[in-house]
Amino acid sequence: MIPYGRQTINDADVQAVVDVLRSDFLTQGPAVPNFENSVAHYCGAQYAFAVNSATSALHIACLALGVGKGDRVWTSPITFVASSNCALYCGASVDFVDINPQSYNMSATCLANKLAQAKKSGCLPKVLIPVHLCGQSCDMETIHRLSKLYGFRIIEDASHAIGGKYHGEPIGNCCYSDITVFSFHPVKIITTGEGGMALTNDAVLSKSMQLFRNHGITREVDQMTHEPDGPWYYQQIGLGYNYRLTDLQAAFGFSQMQRLDEFVAKRHALAKRYDEMLSNLPIVLPWQHPDNYSSFHLYIIRLKLEQIGRTHRDVFEALRAAGIGVNLHYIPVYLQPYYQRLGFKPGHCPEAERYYAEAISLPMFPALTFEEQDQVVRALKTIISA
């Protein structure tokens, strides 16, 4: 079975982990700040905090922005459930902004219309979480402008997008947001096994996120309520969580960072080849905005079902039967049973539901060979032409 995604690990990655295993630090040592500094420097952000998952990063980002009971957080319906769950963890309510039919990211037009209506009814969001699906940035310039007009804060869910660019600058520089979040899950652009990171240029937010990831504990004298009792002293000054990344994972991530641009370039080469080989089929190929440079975490096609004569499920299952490990990213979050119990119903975001009825993610990862890619294309052609 050719998977839809797979990590790429070399001897240098293995040696980096072995070196930590033979060192004095397995959990919190020098590898964590080294990894944080490498990502911050690459992206052009001032502060970066490694955590044990992108979900944890989203959670501490919401907490740092003061999200709580009575607040509203909006995000995209086409994302993993963590993008909205993080707000629920804080006691806030969530809502969803429909997607752009070309990029599948949050529609800036739908957002503007929804904000105008929300202002009239007095229910504007406190925080917006746009999601950079597949690694292509949302229209952050427009979203940022709307944030100034309506007074909300922005967390970029860039879980798919490290190595991508927006207007020629690295995604993660927080030029148009308060906080940006990356994921280092095994199928993402780089991996730490499990892990995530939150980046910001705001010194106040950075101190908050640092506390929230480590039980609310500080060793900084200027944050304490009184002079320390001795060099061993620390204080818990808030309620935080054990969201720390280990030195083992951080060393792995730092090693992976050395090949980030190479990974993204390989993904682009594969995407271009898919585009060429699939151009004459009754499918919609991924659209790329000319001002964006996607990290191409995913390669998503949409089936023109009226021309194919087979159902979405038929095509999906036939590809799996042919040894092609396709997937579907994602089911609209509000269609999940938990969210329907919160009051959401089908029809809430029509474009997202049309997308869901047609989308399939084809295999995309740097180690995918041309022979394997040819196998994917042959299977797809056979199935939709039958």
Image (cartoon, grey):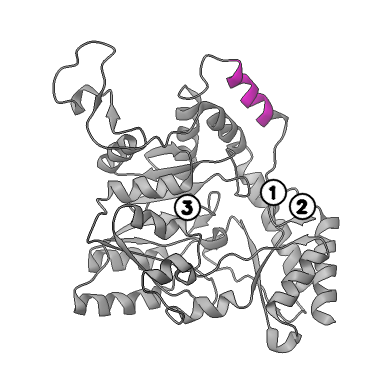
Q: Residue furthest left?
A: 226
Query: Image quadrant of residue 216?
Result: top left
Main SS class of the magenta portion in the image: helix
Q: Which residues are magenta?
A: 13-22
Query: Mark 1 packing: few (<14 Cα in 10 Å), some, or many (20+)?
Result: some
Q: Residues within 10 Å of mark 2 (few under 14, many from 20)?
A: some
Assess whether mark 1 and mark 3 are in contact (beta carbons under 8 angstroms).
no
| Residue 15 in the image, given as x and y percentages of width and height | 67, 24
Q: Determine whether the residue tagged by mark 1 lies in a helix, strand or loop.
A: loop
Q: What is the spatial separation of the Cα atoms under label 2 and label 1, in whole angstroms?
A: 9 Å
> Which is more toward the observer, 274 or 119?
119
Q: Which residue does the image show at 50% across and 63% down from the upper left?
A: 79
User: Which sits in the foreground, 144 or 386?
Assistant: 386
User: Counting residues from the N terminus, which is met first, the one under dot 3 or under dot 1?
Assistant: 1
Amino acid carrying mark 2 in the image: Leu
Q: Which labelled disc corresponds to residue 171?
A: 3
Residue ID at (36%, 50%) = 179
The picture places residue 214, in percent across and down from the top left corner, at: 35, 32
Residue type highlighted by circle 1: Arg
What's the mark number on residue 368?
Answer: 2
- Residue 273, horizontal then vertical, whole percent: 76, 63
Q: Residues within 10 Å of mark 3 (few under 14, many from 20)?
A: many
Is 276 on the left or on the right of 178, as rendered? right
For the point 57% across and 74% down, the residue is 356
Numbered label attached to residue 6: 1
The three-letter amino acid code for the residue at tag 3 is Ile
Verify CB contact (< 8 Å) between mark 2 and mark 1: yes
Q: In the image, residue 384 lies at what x, y percent?
A: 79, 79
Taking the spot 61% from the left edge, 37% from the top edge, the residue there is 256
Q: Relative to 15, does residue 158 appear above or below in the rendering?
A: below
The quarter in which the N terminus is drawn is bottom right
